Amino acid sequence: MDAHVGCNGREAVEMCRTHVYTLVLLREIMAHVWGIEAASLIRDLPSPFNGTSIVMVTTKPIGQFSTTDLFLAGIDDVIEEPYSVKEMQALFVRGRPKPGFFSHC
């Protein structure tokens, strides 16, 4: 498995413009472009770049966004910090979550 790291939301979106990822983790609050906005921008990319599974990493139960906000932005799942290695592994095992499914809400 390969992993790429973007330093901010803008970099995450740019990386998704040129590489098809199985899973993208976005922090709720990111420099330049927040996670929810980055998710929406990724979903607006042409196929196949927009088909990745997007998971929001948040510090509290969904933070300041509702599940509807997250779903409409194209976020497939949420994981709250602090998360365990077991929880992170479960994200990779699940693969692509069902749209609208939030495992940690």
Image (cartoon, rainbow, N blue to C red):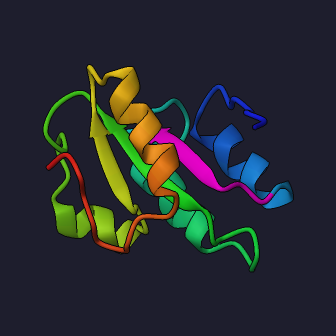
Image point (74%, 78%), residue name: 46
> 1 or 64: which is nearer to us?
1
Q: Quadrant of the N terminus?
A: top right
Image point (14%, 50%), residue name: 105
x then y, percent, for residue 82? 26, 19
x then y, percent, for residue 40? 49, 65
For this view, does 46 lie left or right of residue 70?
right
x then y, percent, for residue 31? 52, 30
x then y, percent, for residue 65? 20, 52
Q: Is residue 15 magenta?
A: no
Question: What is the quadrant of residue 34 in the picture?
Answer: top left
Q: Which residues are magenta?
A: 20-26
Residue 71 seen? yes
Is 16 drawn above or below residue 88 in the view shown? below
Residue 29 seen? no
Query: Outermost residue, bottom direction?
Result: 47
Question: What is the quadrant of residue 100 in the picture?
Answer: bottom left
For this view, does 78 lie left or right of residue 63?
right
Image point (51%, 42%), residue name: 25
